[in-house]
Image (cartoon, rainbow, N blue to C red):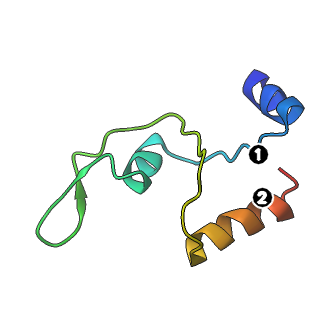
Amino acid sequence: DCLQAMAKSSGIPLIEVDSRMDLGEWLGHCQYDKDGAARKVKGTSSVAIKEYGEETEALAFVLNHIKEKSL
């Protein structure tokens, strides 16, 4: 697909997710109920990460995934 070709030619890793709703929740585009469950999740089609922030286990997982998949 065109987006994959553009990302690859620019040296930008592209990770696809199964659901826009999952991505929206991961980004915090939702409200949480008293039990901590996500409600009113806003589907999100894409995100660009410019700064990773602090080193965490989650960041290590993503970077390892990028490396393993040669993205």
Vertical relation: 60 (above or below) 18: below
Residues under numbered marks 1 and 2 in contact, where contact means CB atoms less than 8 Å apart: yes
Of the numbered discs 1 and 2, the one sitting upstream in the chain is 1
CA gap between label 1 and label 2 equals 7 Å
Q: What is the residue that sits farthest to the bottom in this orientation?
A: 57
Q: Quadrant of residue 26?
A: bottom left
Left or right, residue 3 beside residue 31 = right
Q: Quadrant of residue 12?
A: top right
Q: Secondary structure at mark 1?
A: loop
Left or right, residue 6 beside residue 60 = right
* Mark identifier at residue 13: 1
Residue 23: x and y in percent read 47, 48
**What residue lies at 76% left-to-right and 45% top-to-bottom?**
13
**What residue lies at 84% left-to-right and 58% top-to-bottom?**
69
**What residue lies at 77% left-to-right and 58% top-to-bottom?**
66
Residue 21: x and y in percent read 40, 45
Residue 52: x and y in percent read 59, 57
**What residue lies at 85% left-to-right and 39% top-to-bottom?**
11
**Mark 2 residue crowding within 10 angstroms, few (<14) / some (14–19) / many (20+):** some
Vertical relation: 30 (above or below) 6: below
Question: Looking at this view, is 41 or 62 the one in front?
Answer: 62
**Mark 1 residue crowding within 10 angstroms, few (<14) / some (14–19) / many (20+):** some
Q: Amino acid at mark 2?
A: Ile
Q: Report the quarter where the N terminus lies.
A: top right
Q: Secondary structure at mark 2?
A: helix
Question: Looking at this view, is 53 or 46 the one in front?
Answer: 53
Vertical relation: 4 (above or below) 21: above
Q: Which residue is mark 2?
A: 66
Q: Amino acid at mark 1?
A: Pro
